Amino acid sequence: MADLEPLKAGQRYRCKGCGALTRFDVVKTTRTKSFYHFTIGGALNEEDVEVLAEAIETVTCRWCGHGKDIEVIDALEETETPTQ
């Protein structure tokens, strides 16, 4: 996959190798800012999470294992999943 940008609304992945649309292993790094609120008992509640940066490192098809033939398509472009 040449362009490893995070997906935008209305986009999805498609494996050009097997046609899969629904199962992908995605490795990403996310940098966030958040408010930590600890209870008196010490339990952490993370609130107001803001994504500052996100980078997609790899996308691999769960069906066939390929990571080189993944493309970003319009989510409504194709709705059939492969039968395997």
Image (cartoon, grey):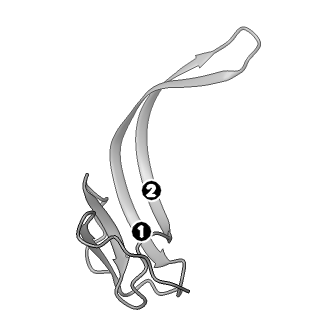
Q: Nearer the viewer, residue 72 or 59?
A: 72
Q: In the visual, does 30 lie left or right of 52?
A: right
Q: In the visual, does 29 lie left or right of 39?
A: left
Quadrant of image for the C terminus: bottom right
Dot 1 and dot 2 residues touching (CB under 8 Å): yes
> Callout 1 environment at 10 Å: few (<14), some (14 to 19), or many (20+)?
few
Residue drawn 30% across the image and 59% down it:
7
Q: Identify the secondary structure beneath mark 2.
A: strand
The quarter holding residue 40 reads top right
Q: Position of residue 21 (x, y in %)?
A: 40, 73
Tag 1: amino acid:
Glu
The residue carrying mark 1 is 57
Q: Position of residue 67 (x, y in %)?
A: 44, 83
Quick one: label 1 or label 2, which is nearer the N terminus?
Answer: 2
Q: In the visual, does 39 lie left or right of 10?
A: right
Residue drawn 45% across the image and 60% down it:
28
> Callout 2 environment at 10 Å: few (<14), some (14 to 19), or many (20+)?
few
Q: Nearer the viewer, residue 72 or 78?
A: 78
Residues at marks 1 and 2, CA–CA distance in whole angstroms = 7 Å
Marker disc for residue 65: none
The residue carrying mark 2 is 29
